[in-house]
Amino acid sequence: MKKSAFVLNLIFFLAIIILDVFYIVNGGIVLKSITSACFFLLGVINLIFVLKMKTEKIKFSILLLVGLFFAMLGDILLEINFIVGAIFFAIGHIFYFISFCFIERLKWTDLIFGIVIFIPSVLVITLYPHFDFGGVAMEVLCVVYAFVISFMVGKAISMYVAKRSISRLIIMIGTILFFFSDLMLLFNVFSSVSSVFGVLCLATYYPAEFLLAFSILFTTVLDQILQSNNSAKAK
């Protein structure tokens, strides 16, 4: 079952990358919706595998899937209403953060990493001269969103620093790519510097979501492998 699960994840990864490229070239909300649905569907499939494994990390898996659901909705709604889409993304980040707390409890180092990320983010939003938010309300929304995603990424980095493992590395890379993608989105939407920011946003966003969806399975499988190895050594 584990082998088939990893093969299925590889297939979804290739499909997401191909759809991502097509969306970058052609655009369109339908294609974007399909691409977003793919990483959420992968999360659902991985959760099914996790349920069959009867792991202790079921809460992490379920909450992360909820985060993927809100990210999917946010990605789609962003094309219809930017503010609503951003709110759904922020809710998704909150669920990601909570899910990470079921891997490792909240620590003061999480807050430190979050602050280190948040402060320069706010400085970029408020001081970069080429941003045009069209009003204070949108700028405040971006700052609030930066606060939420900064502490989500900070938690992921803190987890990896506390205990280095492949599963935590996957989560950390996924969140960092997500943060970078949103940073590129900020430049693409609120400044007219270069259209390359839109490409960079999309080129990193969907791989980020794949890694998070993949972590639902990988974190659980790795945990079972370690438990099996420890049992074998004990014998």
Image: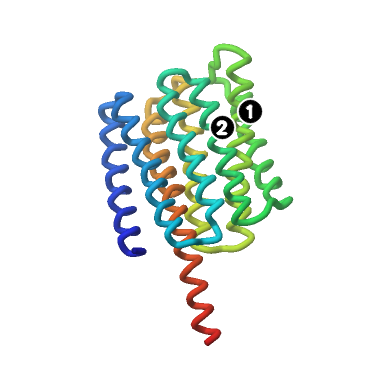
Q: Earlier in the sequence, mark 1 or mark 2?
A: 2
Does 60 appear above or below 133? below
Left/right placement of residue 216 relative to residue 60 reads left
The residue drawn where x is 50% and y is 40% is 66
Rendered location of residue 193, percent (x, y): 44, 23
Q: As drawn, which residue projects farthest toward the top?
A: 135
Q: Give percent across and percent down for residue 201.
A: 42, 34
Characterize the local packing of mark 1: few (<14), some (14-19) or many (20 or more) Cα atoms within 10 angstroms.
some
Q: Residue furthest right?
A: 108
Q: Is residue 208 above or below residue 196?
A: below
Q: What amino acid does circle 2 point to?
A: Ala
Above or below, 143 against 177 in this view is above
Q: Are marks 1 and 2 in contact (CB under 8 Å)?
A: yes
Q: Secondary structure at mark 2?
A: helix
Q: Quadrant of the N terminus?
A: bottom left
Query: How many marks can you see?
Result: 2
Residue depicted at 40% across the width and 46% down the height = 44
Residue 32 occupies which quadrant of the picture? top left
Above or below 209: residue 223: below
Residue underneath mark 2: 90
Identify the mark at residue 193; answer none if there is no mark: none
Going by the numbered disc 1, the residue's amino acid type is: Val
Count neighbours of disc 2 (C-alpha within 10 A) and say few if under 14, some if 14 to 19, many if 20 or more: many
Q: How is the image coloured?
A: rainbow
Label drawn at residue 144: 1
User: Residue shown at 62%/15% (left/top)?
Assistant: 137
Which quadrant would residue 20 be assigned to in this image? Answer: top left
Return the x and y of residue 198 as percentages of the image width and height: 39, 29
Q: Nearer the viewer, mark 1 or mark 2?
A: 2
At x 63%, y 21%, the residue is: 140
